[in-house]
Image (cartoon, grey):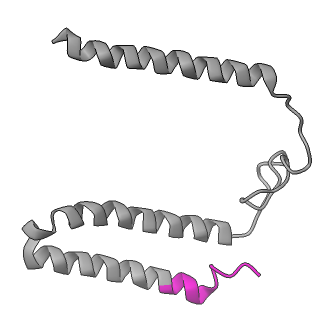
């Protein structure tokens, strides 16, 4: 029984040592310079070292909510698709209703212009 776990334990030790060596070498060899591109506004629309209470466009919230909605949709669709044969018609109708509600939210955000960036 221990022979089976011995291989996993050796693999874990090897991966820990190898990752520690890589991180240590990266800290030793790479120079850290803060250029303009690294401290510029990337995806969130504001500079990373400004005041944290600064206001910014509400579209970032809307896109984040849209991402969460579709992320949740995938977490519900995957188990549904795996167990599709056992759910019969009630499972099919409930998932169609769920997707329809999400589609209404998506169309609402699209009509409000949340996906327009210009």
Q: Position of residue 97 (x, y in %)?
A: 26, 81
List the single residue furthest toward the top: 2
**In this picture, residue 51 sits left or right of residue 73:** right
Residue name at image x 56 percent, y 85 percent: 110
Residue name at image x 55 percent, y 19 percent: 18
Which quarter of the figure is the N terminus placed in? top left
Residue stretch rendered in magenta on the structure: 107-118
Q: Nearer the viewer, residue 56 or 87?
A: 87
Q: Tell me which corner region of the image, top left, top right, bottom left or bottom right, holds residue 80.
A: bottom left
List the single residue furthest toward the bottom: 111
Q: Nearer the viewer, residue 10 or 79?
A: 10
**In this picture, residue 48 sits left or right of residue 114:** right
Q: Is residue 27 above or below residue 50?
A: above
Q: Is residue 41 above or below residue 25?
A: below
Q: Is residue 3 above or below residue 93?
A: above
Q: Nearer the viewer, residue 11 or 59?
A: 11
Residue name at image x 83 percent, y 48 percent: 51
């Amino acid at each position: 029984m221990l022979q089976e776990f011995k291989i996993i334990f050796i693999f874990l030790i090897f991966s820990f040592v190898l990752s520690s060596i890589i991180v240590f070498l990266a800290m030793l060899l790479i120079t850290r310079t803060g250029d303009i591109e690294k401290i510029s506004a990337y995806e969130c629309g504001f500079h990373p070292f400004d005041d944290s209470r600064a206001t910014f466009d509400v579209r970032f919230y809307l896109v984040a909510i849209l991402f969460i909605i579709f992320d949740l949709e995938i977490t519900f669709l995957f188990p549904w698709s795996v167990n599709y044969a056992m759910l019969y018609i009630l499972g099919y109708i409930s998932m169609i209703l769920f997707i329809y509600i999400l589609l209404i939210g998506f169309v609402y955000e699209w009509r409000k212009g949340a996906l327009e960036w210009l």
